[in-house]
Image (cartoon, rainbow, N blue to C red):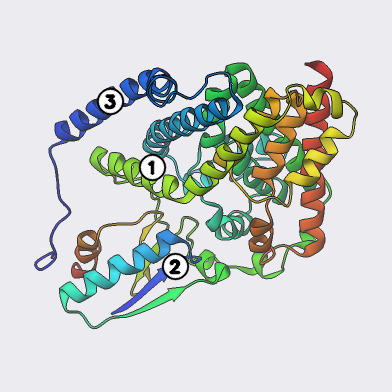
Amino acid sequence: MDVKILGTGCAKCNSLEAATRTAIDELGLSAAIDHVTDPGEIASWGVMSTPALVVDDEVVLAGRVPTAAEVAALLSGR
Amino acid sequence: MNTTGTPPAVRPSWRSWATVAGAAALWFALYRVNLPFWDWLLYDVIGLDQTSRLGEAVHFFCYDVTKIALLLTGVIFVVTVLRSFMSVERTRALLGGRREGIGNVAAASLGVVTPFCSCSAVPVFIGFVAAGVPLGVTLSFLIASPLVNEVAIVLLFGLFGWQVTAMYIGAGLAIAIVAGFVLGRMHLEGWVEPFVFETKLRGQLVDPSRGLSWDDRLEMGREEVVTILRKIWPYLLVGVGLGAVIHGWMPADWFATHATGLLGVPIAVAVGVPLYSNAAGVLPLVEALHDKGLPMGTVLAFMMSVVALSLPEMILLRRVLQPKLIATFVGVVASGILAIGFFFNAVL
């Protein structure tokens, strides 16, 4: 599983990364988290509201910080 | 699916609403007792002299910090919940295909109501321009969004009343519309970093304003209050502190005797542009300066130049705009602020 956090380094982006890490650990997944901070690459995903979560090349969430449980639900559905 | 992960908690909605109603009642009660409470504590219990400089300054500080914190809490919550129905994605869809002129008006107005964090200014810029929104229209949005923000509106309303607030909103929108239009007419697309136009938008668009329950939106409001208060409390304390010192020790009408000339507005803008603060830090200071006779046009010009133009935002925008364009952008916006300052000083 390939997980990307899209965010320019703001506080919310770090909260999303923390929530995602918790969710991955809880689910016992082996997924690498990649934090994308380049604004050009973020925009090329079609994302304008950071932070955003990309799972296996698909944007699943943008513009807000979910709970770890919500991320777990998004990840386990794949 | 969803076998191992815990599903998002679904609370009965009436409980959230009861909490909101309780919090609102508490808010109104606190707002009402703010002045009598500090009068009682500082003058009656502690025994500070009401007419002394120290007494006045301490009272100003305690009363203003409480009042501003309450105003911010209430307004950020309400505005965040309302704004959760809007998104930058929706705004871009509304702006797509609009011509310059009407497009600038729409972009400035949408800049006021769209939830937007300056940390995503660059992805928004690329997203707008790559999707075909004209450069000038995009800039109108980026000017209006920080300039006419809810924190500024509420604090102006709380400290200066609705007339000044209405003037500020009108002036802010005018600057965003005219500056964006002028910059669009200058055809500066060649000064945008070329990769912006080459960016291909892939991926499924996720609109953050959709698919949320009322509980989600209320929770977002609560979180935003915590996030913003945590971020701005140092600015608030410093701003009110400086305001309190000015309030207690600066002679009344100091500005009326020392800063009557035409230089007031340019000096205010020159000091305000590089200064990095936010509305919560600037307004208490500005309120105290106005009390000492600084004219309203100068006050508003100072505040606008602090919130609209900041060095950190320019450094961010450098990723997509060449320095020539950034300089032109700052020049056009600063000229607009100067004009507004002179205008208000002349008519008020």
In this orientation, which residue lies closer to the viewer: B24 or B12?
Answer: B24
Q: Which residue is mark 1?
A: B225
Q: Disc 1 is attached to a residue of which chain?
A: B
Query: Marks 3 and 2: CB-CB under 8 Å?
Result: no
Residue at left offset 52%, top offset 67%: A44
Do marks 3 and 2 share a subunit? no
Q: Disc 2 is attached to a residue of which chain?
A: A
Q: Which residue is mark 2?
A: A6
Q: Is residue A23 above or below residue B120?
A: below
The x and y percentages for residue B272 are 73, 44
Residue B204 in sight here: no
Under mark 3, the amino acid is: Leu
Q: Disc 3 is attached to a residue of which chain?
A: B
Residue at left offset 83%, top offset 40%: B267
Q: Residues within 10 Å of mark 2 (few under 14, many from 20)?
A: many
Q: Nearer the viewer, mark 3 or mark 1?
A: 3
Q: Residues within 10 Å of mark 1 (few under 14, many from 20)?
A: many
Under mark 2, the amino acid is: Leu
Under mark 1, the amino acid is: Val
How far, Cα to Cα, is label 2 from label 1?
Answer: 24 Å
Q: Quadrant of residue B44?
A: top left
Q: Image check: B340 left or right of B169?
A: right
Looking at marks 3 and 1 on the same chain, the residue that comes earlier in the sequence is marked by 3
Residue at left offset 82%, top offset 61%: B324
In this orientation, which residue lies closer to the viewer: A18 or B60?
Answer: B60
Quarter of the image with the C terminus of chain B is: top right
Residue A32 image label = none
Residue at left offset 23%, top offset 74%: A24
